[in-house]
Amino acid sequence: PPTGEVAGWTRTGATRIFPAANLWEYIDGDAERYIQAGVEQTLTADYRYQNKTDAVADIHIMKSADGPRKLLESESSADSKSASVGEAARLYATSLVFRKGRSLVRVVAYEESPRVGQALVELGQAIEKRLGTM
C-alpha cells in the first residue's frame, strides 16, 4: 500500500519484483525452498513505521494455493500467535507471515517495540485487501 493508506506507515521505496529464476538475488540461501513451493514471482517493498521502525513486506505469488499453505506450515510456531489476516497467519515479536490464495506474505520489522505487532497486522491487512487486485 502507498504512504498514507495505513496509519503510521510510510513506503520508503519502489516495489521491486523478482521472477522465480532470479529470486536468489533477493533471498540468497533460501530461494530454493520458495522455488520448490512453486513461486512465480516475489514483490518486495520497504516501509517505515512512525518514522522510527524500518520494515520490509514480501509477497510471494505461487502457482497454486498449495505452495503458500506448505510454506506457512513449515514455519516454526514457537513464540507465535495467530492473527486476523488472510486465511491463516502467524504473528511473532517482529514479523507477520500469512497466506491468502496463491500468495504468502511476510512483513518483517527490524526492531521490536510495544506496538510493532499490532502495526504489522494493520499493514498486513492492507496488503491482504490489495491481493484481490493482483
Image (spheres, rainbow, N blue to C red):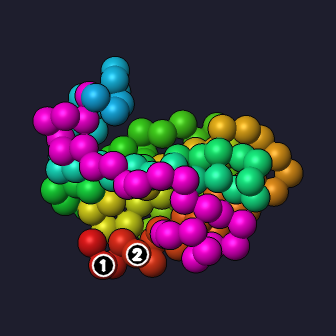
**The label number, if any, that marks residue 79 in the structure image:** none
Q: Which residue is mark 2?
A: 130
Q: Which residues are magenta?
A: 1-24
Q: Which residue is mark 1?
A: 133
Of all residues, the one furthest to the front in this rendering is: 13
x and y percentages locating residue 91 in the rendered image: 63, 52
- Residue 93 appearing in the image: no
Q: Nearer the viewer, residue 132 or 33?
A: 132
| Contact between labelled residues 2 and 1, with CB atoms less than 8 Å apart | yes
The residue at the point 42 percent across, 39 percent down is 74
The residue at the point 33 percent across, 49 percent down is 16
Q: Is the residue marked by circle 2 packed among few (<14), some (14-19), or many (20+) residues within 10 Å?
A: few
x and y percentages locating residue 64 in the rendered image: 19, 59
Q: Secondary structure at mark 1?
A: loop
Q: Amino acid at mark 1?
A: Thr
The residue at the point 48 percent across, 58 percent down is 98
x and y percentages locating residue 131 in the rendered image: 36, 72
Q: Amino acid at mark 2?
A: Arg
Q: In 3D space, how far apart are the residues under numbered discs 1 and 2 (Cα atoms)?
A: 6 Å
88 to 47, vertically: above or below? below
Side of 51 where 68 appears, left or right: left
Side of 92 where 107 appears, left or right: left
